[in-house]
Amino acid sequence: MAKHPESLMMTQGYRPEWSEGALKCPIFQTSTFVFKNAKEGQDFFELAYGLRPQKPKESLGLIYSRLNNPDLEILESRLCLWDRADSAAVFSSGMAAITTTILEFTTPGDVILYSEPLYGGTAHFFNTILPRFGVKAVPFAAAKGPESARKELDKISAKGRLAMVFIETPANPTNDLVDITACAKFAASYSTKKRRAVLAVDNTFLGPLWQRPLSLGADLVLYSATKFLGGHSDLIA
Ligand SMILES: Cc1ncc(COP(=O)(O)O)c(C=O)c1O
């Protein structure tokens, strides 16, 4: 019988036999990991940097904690359970996750559509930093939905240039709601064969227990784990 995420969360991704049999995962407080020999190090780096395809059954060895670390890998695999996601990446803050995601998916000349209101840090990044990189951020009022921006997007010929629809629902600080499925359809209407406009959802406020954006058509889900995912105001992630 398939186990529920609530049960899998207790053990997912953790191998006690790799940690002296410790029932609970230790904190691996190290920047760097030791290779058996130089060849092993070379193999790990080549895979990490995408210099060659992954061999069958090969997994990425531990290198350096900015690239991978057992605690982060375990957390990532457990976050995937809740969101029914294929993979996850953990960052040192919610803003690090958001800015890295946007920079990965955009190039100069692109357009991003976003729901308003947004968390202040995200709004600042969209309106002050992104224009410096030649990316135009276009807002739509959460209450009016993405269709309210179609005229403006069409005026700037956004088809094929719309890299992302970014929404925050419920929004910080007003709890405004945005229809995730409608945004997925809207993003699809600006996609071309060459270029898919992706839908990213900041799901910080409800968290994956109460809202699973991927099941509603979103491509990416982001969190400030600093908030309800962390739960105790004792970390930034
Ligand atoms: C909805 C939302 N997204 C992102 C962030 C940014 O996250 P962090 O403070 O972890 O960088 C916040 C922080 O308040 C937030 O409320």
Image: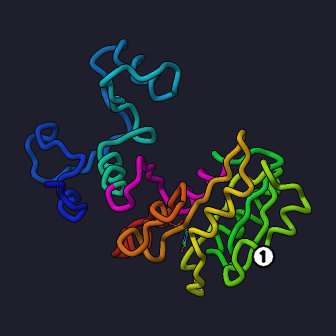
Q: Residue at x 80, y 46 (%)?
A: 108
Q: Is residue 74 left or right of residue 178?
A: left
User: How many numbered dots are placed on residues in this image?
Assistant: 1
Residue 84 in the image: state x and y as whole percent: 37, 56
In the image as oriented, which residue stretches furthest toward the top? 39
Residue 174 in the image: state x and y as whole percent: 59, 87
Which of the two residues, 10 or 33, is positioned nearer the viewer here? 10
* Magenta highlight range: 81-103
Magenta stretch containing residue 102, yes or no?
yes
Which of the two residues, 172 or 209, is positioned nearer the viewer here? 209
Which of the two residues, 212 or 132, is positioned nearer the viewer here? 212
The residue pinned by badge 1 equals: 148
Residue 177 in the image: state x and y as whole percent: 58, 81
Residue 58 in the image: state x and y as whole percent: 32, 24
In the image as oriented, which residue stretches furthest toward the right? 155
Quarter of the picture containing the C terminus is bottom left
Quarter of the picture containing the N terminus is bottom left
Q: Residue at x 34, y 32 (%)?
A: 62
Q: Residue at x 75, y 54 (%)?
A: 162
Which of the two residues, 99 or 209, is positioned nearer the viewer here? 209
Q: Amino acid at mark 1?
A: Ser
Tell me where residue 149 sits by quadrant: bottom right
In the image as oriented, which residue stretches furthest toward the bottom? 174
Quarter holding ligand 1: bottom right
